Image: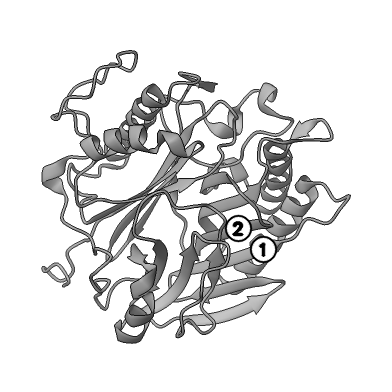
Amino acid sequence: MLHYQRQVEIGSVSQPKSKQSVVDRGAWSSPATSTQRIPVSNTHPLRTAYVETALLETILTASPSNFLGVVFYDRSPGQPRGLGACPVVCLDLPQLNEPPLAEVWTSTLPVTYHQAEGIHFAMNDEVLFGVLQLEESPGTPLDIVTYTGYRRLLVQTRALGYPHLLRVWNYFPSINLESNGLERYQRFCVGRHQALAENLPDFQRMLPAGTAVGTTSGPLQIYFLASTQPGTPVENPRQMNAYEYPRVYGPRSPAFARATLRPSISGSHLFIAGTASVVGHASQHVGMPYQQTLETLHNLNVMITHTEQLHEVSRGKLHRQALFKVYIRHPEHVSTVSDIVKQLLPVHTQVLYLQGEMCRSELLLEIEGILVSRNKINGAIPA
């Protein structure tokens, strides 16, 4: 679990003590490293890992897993052979750590592929992975483009039998640029809010965890997970629910949950939304990357602790695998951020550092995560 052994003093500029761990180090086992085959069993509908892009083609050939999707953090990578109809995302988000990694989603269940209305889908009996790309035409505001994309994916996932959105990632350039009186992120929020409100009953209780990050270039790109069964949205007691933000942040509130908990017969996934240095609804520590990193990690800690308490997830239950993605606005801050992250996360945790722009211009970084547990099945933990 994410756990502080004692409160971190956010206002202090001293280095965090080595015993102040964001994740309980004794509760975690090592996930697949980039040089290992992704571990598999016959009971996993959904798995993810960061894999060296140089090894991906070999893994595609050797792995018994079925591939749901691959995310490259390169605008135009050389696509490896063997992906076939598997959904692929290529984002212009420069990676700030080495070696180059791809985000690989797999399943040990049979996977089928489908395309409709410009969306590429990969599906098994439990989950769906989808990818959608929308070009912005001159004169068409981003809110209209976003509304169109979200309406398509909601209609199609429902028609395919996966009506429950679990997690959505949204990427588009110039996120803080003003467009006809609104920041582009605010326009994005208008379109997303309208589509979700129209297509989800009691939509505020069904919102998926979300990320919205600005890329260096490219169209609006969305990739997402949906399920045959609903996940459970989780909010952060330190932060105002994003869907209740005051209008000072835009005409429509950001429509996402802070996290989604998805139980499964093979284990649980906790999908943590993009998390930044925000308390209540206000940005904290403007211009101070060190303090923003500590505040962000404290928010993550509170989120995990709250999930454990609210949903009776025992300490160490979410222990099998942990992946974090750290978006940093200015590359010169990467050493400051990574030094703190390394001290407060276990050494075996997979962390990907990317250069991206946050939804508010004063925010210097954002962290999201995926925590995975594995349940006992028939009295034994699957290999």
Q: CA distance from mark 1 to mark 2?
A: 6 Å
Q: Residue 275, can we see it?
A: no
The residue labelled by disc 2 is 222
Q: Amino acid at mark 1?
A: Gln
Q: Measuring 56% from the left and 73% from the top, which residue is drawn there?
A: 121
* Between 267 and 1, the one nearer to me in the picture: 1
- In the image, residue 18 sits, relative to residue 204, either above or below, namely above
N-term mark: 1 or 2: 1
Q: What is the number of the mark on residue 133?
A: 1
Q: Quadrant of the C terminus?
A: bottom left
Asked which secondary structure carries label 2, the reply is strand
Q: Amino acid at mark 2?
A: Ile
Tell which residue pokes out farthest to the right in this image. 139
Asked which secondary structure carries label 1, the reply is strand
Where is residue 80 shown, x and y percent of the image?
46, 79
Where is residue 372 shown, x and y percent of the image?
29, 55
